[in-house]
Every structure is written in structure tokens, then in C-alpha cells.
Image (cartoon, rainbow, N blue to C red):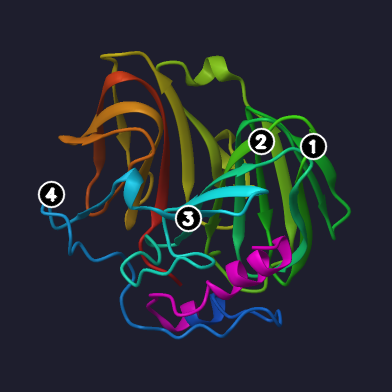
Amino acid sequence: MKRKDFLKASLLATAGLAIKGSEAATVMSNNNDELLPVNPVGFNHLPNTSSKLAPNTVLHKAETRGGADYGWLKTKHTFSFANYYNPDRMNFGVLRVLNDDIITGGSGFPTHPHDNMEIISIPLFGDLQHKDSMGNTSVIRAFDVQSMTAGKGIKHSEYNFNKDKEARFLQIWLFPEKANLKPSYDQKTFQPVERKNKLQTVVSPYGKDGGISIQQQAWFSLGKFEKNKTTQYKIKRKGNGAYIFVIEGSVNVNGILLNNRDGLGIWDIEQLELKFINAGEILIMDVPMQIG
């Protein structure tokens, strides 16, 4: 698939989402020509039809993700995106997109529009060249985290900064707390020592708690742990759930074993208990389960 066609399919994939509440329809409306209007369907988190773990969990094994190899881009989608559509995997609360992308040297996403979305990029290796309609130009490297509030509307591009090596990053979209906000940009470099055998906050509401700023009551934490290490995570806000994504390694979360690139969503809890079966790295996304 050509990059232009991929972007159009990706934008169209935001239609038909599971939402609840009068504000949600406003939050998820889009003014770009490429986006279809959203049709509310009455529930706001993923049903647990395939997992017998517990009624408040959903398990996404790595091999069940959607995705494709376009030559310039190799991608895996935890939730429905572009040409991958699964009605049971549209979102987890306000978490709409979790893409695991590898971009070949010198390639990338040409200028394209977004609105009413919080967009977070977490490079895993390599460097990304960013440009946007707000006038921001930057290179995003490993240990950086980038966020954009698309708000009323922005255009941006993301390219592999290097011609001779791949770049890999997590592309994450959240629905915003309110619609039609003023667009904004944030980027910060985090010290890896601060996530060794502990969790480091890298994304937070309006930049509090040391994370980069987003316009949503959501917190992201990264941690890199040695084998047999344990830790706890307390949910930051009543009404939030946690989506745990294993970047590498194996970890037991509340009695559920997760391996490399597995994802687990849990809601209606106050705390997570984690034990690392093998050395590994995780991303915890603490997000509102109610949209709007």
C-alpha cells in the first residue's frame, strides 16, 4: 500500500467507535474530509468474549494483533486501524490506537491531518523527524516522548531521520477530554536510570507529575525491570482502567502471564501487582474508561 493510501485508510478507521455520553459525540467528531462521522454504539470498553480470565479483563496476545508489511512500513495494530477491523477491538476506554511501527530508512508518514485526538509517540530505537503546522520541527530519539493535542486541527509529518537504518516506535492515540481544543505540542527526554526497576511517569494530564502534557486524565508509565523483580502500581484516578503493554520480556500482572508484545486491559481495580518472570520493559497506560 502506498503511504498516501495507508494514511487515508488509517484516518477512516476512526469511524464507528464504541462510545457513551452526549459529550462523546462531540469529542469524536472530525472536520477533516478524510474522516467519517462517528456513530455511537452504546458501550465504552472492550467486551471480554474470548477471555475467561475475569469479567474486568481483556487479554490481547501479540499474535492476535492486526497489521501489515507495506515495504516502507511494518506495523502491528492492537486496535482496529487502517485495513484491520475487528468490532471487538475498537478501543479500551479513551485508548483508541496502539500501533507498533517499524519505518525503513528515509521513509515515513507524509503531511496529513488530525483533529480531536491526543497523539503520543514513544521511540524504541532510531530517530524520527517531526514537522507540523504549528511550526514545530524536531528529531525524536530513544528515551524521548512526544505528544500532540490535535484539537481543532493540525497537519504533521513523521519520517525516519536516518537513511541507513530502521526506526521503531509506539504510536498511541487517545480521545481528548474536550473537543476542539487549541492544538499544542510537547516533547521531553527522560533519563533511563529513572525507570530501572521502577516505574517512570512519562505522560500526564496537563504536564503534572513530571510527564509530557496531554489534554486527558491519563497517565503513562514506563519501567525496565530485572528478572524476579516485583512492583505495584496504583490506579491514579477513580473511573480509570489500566492497559499494560509488554515491550519486551515476561511479566505476571495480577496473576496473568504476559509475554513480549502482549497487552492486558484491567478495569474496576485500585492496584496492579507485577512480577517479572524474565527481565523486561513495560508500558502502563492509565486511562479513563468513560469517553466524554
First along the sequence among labels 3 and 2: 3
Q: Dot 2, crowdedness within 10 Å: few (<14), some or many (≥20)?
A: many
What amino acid is labelled 3 in the image?
Gly
Give the image location of residue 161, x and y in percent: 79, 37
Residue placed under numbered mark 1 in the picture: 161
Q: Residue at x 31, y 37 (%)?
A: 234
Residue placed under numbered mark 3 in the picture: 67
Q: Looking at the rendered structure, which numbered label has been put on residue 167?
A: 2
First along the sequence among labels 3 and 4: 4
Q: Dot 4, crowdedness within 10 Å: few (<14), some or many (≥20)?
A: few
Which of discs 3 and 4 lies nearer the camera? The answer is 3
Helix, strand or loop at disc 1? loop
What amino acid is labelled 4 in the image?
Leu
Q: Quadrant of the N terminus?
A: bottom right
Give the image location of residue 23, x and y in percent: 49, 79
Alpha-carbon span between mark 3 and mark 2 = 17 Å
What amino acid is labelled 2 in the image?
Ala
Above or below, comparing residue 44 to residue 173 in the picture: below
Residue placed under numbered mark 4 in the picture: 53
First along the sequence among labels 1 and 2: 1
Q: CB under 8 Å between callouts 1 and 2?
A: yes
121 part of magenta stretch: no
Q: Which residues are magenta?
A: 1-24
Alpha-carbon span between mark 4 and mark 2 = 35 Å
Q: Dot 3, crowdedness within 10 Å: few (<14), some or many (≥20)?
A: many
